[in-house]
């Protein structure tokens, strides 16, 4: 019984994914999906609760595809080059699956606790943490993660909303390099004392996060971590960037 239910659920999601890919977000209705899957509408309600439950499951289906692609990106010894490749993969995924992307990100479903969606954000954060560990991050890992995610999201949604014949093919590259100049020391003309302190603070924060220390108590480590994040976010690059304490929406 359980296996039959699982097979039916997979068939419905596969049919909905195909419909979304071919006809876009507007084509997704319980009637259209049930017809495409060869089931009765009550079956969808039994499996997913309601239409919103179906859309959440479909978004999770898309995130699983995206996560597999991100996991297939091999790390190199250059974390900034890896960030470029991760950005390009994100843009390529969105433009090749615009219906899925709008469902996943345009409607904010990545904030709904979908495990694969949260893991894609965690991968971005780990990539940025590697930049910090190398001493090349000009703000805290949290602020940089928010900034990269927000800009990548905006670029893809903007390109999706623009007719293909009118798209600027250089927009993604320009935005990517602008963000990298803002968060890293690559191509930065600002190498003064503030930048150096911010980079060192971000690097030490990551070293303590992973290495730990037995010299301080847990409360002392938490206080030091907060100080280091504040130092990282008071460098020249972060002064015009809202920090995680300002409460912006920024998860990737």
Image: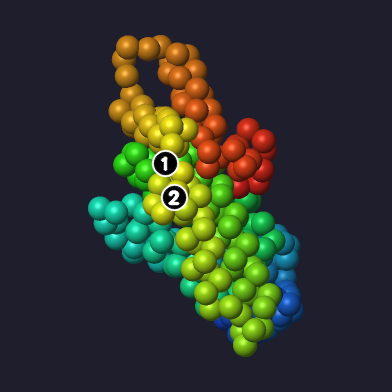
Query: Residue tagged by mark 1?
Result: 191
- 101 left or right, relative to 76: right
In this orientation, which residue lies closer to the viewer: 123 or 194?
Answer: 194
Reply above or below: 162 against 63: below
Q: Position of residue 197 (x, y in %)?
A: 42, 30
**Side of 229 where 203 appears, left or right:** left
Residue at the outermost bottom position:
165
Residue in view at x 49 percent, y 39 percent: 139
- The image's mark for residue 220 is none
The colour scheme is: rainbow
Q: Can residue 135 be seen by looking at this rendering?
A: yes
Say if mark 1 contacts mark 2, CB within 8 Å.
yes
**Viewer-closest of 237 and 144:** 237
Residue at the extreme left: 77
In the displayed structure image, the side of residue 225 where residue 112 appears, left or right:
right
Give the quarter of the image for residue 129.
top left
Image quadrant in which you'd find residue 59:
bottom right
Q: Quadrant of residue 151?
A: bottom right
Query: Distance between the Cα atoms at labels 1 and 2?
Result: 7 Å
What is the total number of numbered labels drawn onto the structure image? 2
Q: How far across and how far down the image is residue 91, in percent? A: 51, 69
Q: Is residue 244 above or below residue 118?
A: above
| Residue at the spot of label 2 | 188
Residue 36's spot in the image, x, y percent?
A: 63, 84
From what the image shows, is residue 32 above or below residue 49?
below
Label 1, secondary structure: give it. Answer: loop
> At 46% across and 54% down in the image, what residue appears?
180
Visible residue check, residue 97: no
Q: Residues within 10 Å of mark 1 (few under 14, many from 20)?
A: few
Residue at 45%, 67% (x, y): give it. Answer: 88
Disc 2 on helix, strand or loop?
loop
């Amino acid at each position: 019984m359980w296996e039959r239910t699982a097979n039916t659920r997979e068939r419905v999601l596969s049919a909905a994914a195909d419909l979304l890919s071919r006809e876009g977000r507007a084509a997704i209705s319980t009637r259209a999906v049930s017809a495409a899957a060869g089931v009765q509408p009550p079956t969808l309600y039994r499996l997913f609760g309601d239409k919103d439950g179906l859309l959440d499951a479909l978004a999770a289906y898309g995130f699983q595809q995206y996560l597999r692609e991100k996991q297939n990106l091999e790390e190199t010894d250059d974390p900034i080059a890896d960030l470029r490749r991760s950005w390009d993969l994100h843009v390529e995924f969105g433009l090749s699956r615009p219906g899925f992307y709008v469902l996943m990100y345009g409607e904010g479903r990545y904030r709904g606790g979908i495990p694969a969606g949260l893991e894609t954000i965690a991968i971005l954060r780990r990539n940025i943490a590697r930049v910090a560990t190398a001493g090349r991050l000009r703000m805290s890992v949290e602020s940089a993660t928010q900034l990269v995610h927000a800009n990548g999201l905006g670029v893809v949604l903007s390109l999706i909303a623009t007719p293909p014949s009118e798209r600027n093919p250089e927009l993604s590259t320009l935005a990517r390099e602008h963000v990298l100049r803002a968060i890293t020391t690559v191509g930065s003309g600002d190498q003064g004392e503030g930048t150096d302190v911010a980079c060192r603070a971000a690097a030490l924060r990551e070293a303590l996060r992973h290495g730990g220390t037995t010299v301080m108590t847990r409360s002392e480590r938490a206080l030091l971590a907060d100080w280091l994040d504040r130092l990282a976010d008071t460098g020249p690059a972060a002064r015009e960037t809202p920090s995680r304490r300002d409460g912006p929406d920024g998860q990737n």
